Amino acid sequence: MASLQMFYQPRAAMHLLILCLFLETAYGQDIWSNPLSLELIVSPLKKANEFTVTLQVKNNVDQCMAVKVSTVSNPNIKYISSHAIYTSCLCDVNNYFWDIQVIANTALQGKAEVVPAKDICPNDENIFPVTSYIGTATQKIFVS
């Protein structure tokens, strides 16, 4: 009984409540901080200074989300086919591709932005409510 008496003191109860709130807040922030993981892969093609760029975007939450995926414009990079911007419903993992030609050593940045899901994700999907997250990945490219 004596061991339970410490919980009746106001200071101990306050510390216990603060600890519980801190643990719950930290857990909640961890879930919402990174809903997406991005990996940028640059693979050389047969021609000099030409590369295939793959941006792999992984959904880290258990809800689908609409994403807009692109690369940041760079004067040292020429897009062979087109500088495509993709918009899709992401429920697990998707890969997005660009073929590029690089003029000089540079850094390429890929970007994925969570956008409103209207007319992108099916209506019956469980949709992630946040629409303001932007994730980026950067890869340096060296030319010969």
Image: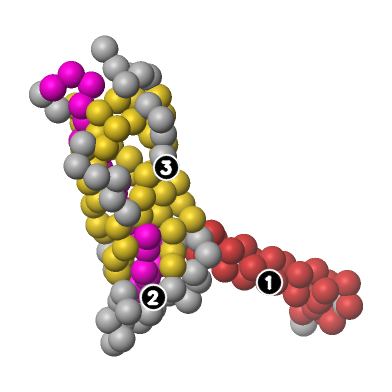
Relative placement, left or right, of 33 versus 35 is right
Residue at label 2?
Answer: 117
Callout 3–callout 2 Cβ contact below 8 Å: no
| Start-end of magenta stretch | 47-68
User: Does the magenta-highlighted stretch encompass residue 9?
Assistant: no
Give the farthest residue toward the bottom.
124
**Residue 107, percent across and down?**
41, 29
Residue at label 1?
Answer: 20
Relative placement, left or right, of 97 versus 7 is left
Residue type at mark 1 is Cys
**Residue 47, percent across and down?**
13, 22
Relative placement, left or right, of 31 versus 36 is right
Residue neighbourhood size for the residue with mark 2, other residues' Cα within 10 Å, grouped as few (<14), some (14–19), many (≥20): many
Location of the N terminus (image quadrant): bottom right
79 or 10, which lies in front?
79
- Give the structural element (helix, strand or loop) at label 3: loop
Residue at label 3?
Answer: 72
Residue type at mark 2 is Ala
User: Does the magenta-highlighted stretch encompass residue 65?
Assistant: yes
- Give the structural element (helix, strand or loop) at label 1: helix
- Give the structural element (helix, strand or loop) at label 2: loop
- Residue at 75% in and 74% down: 17
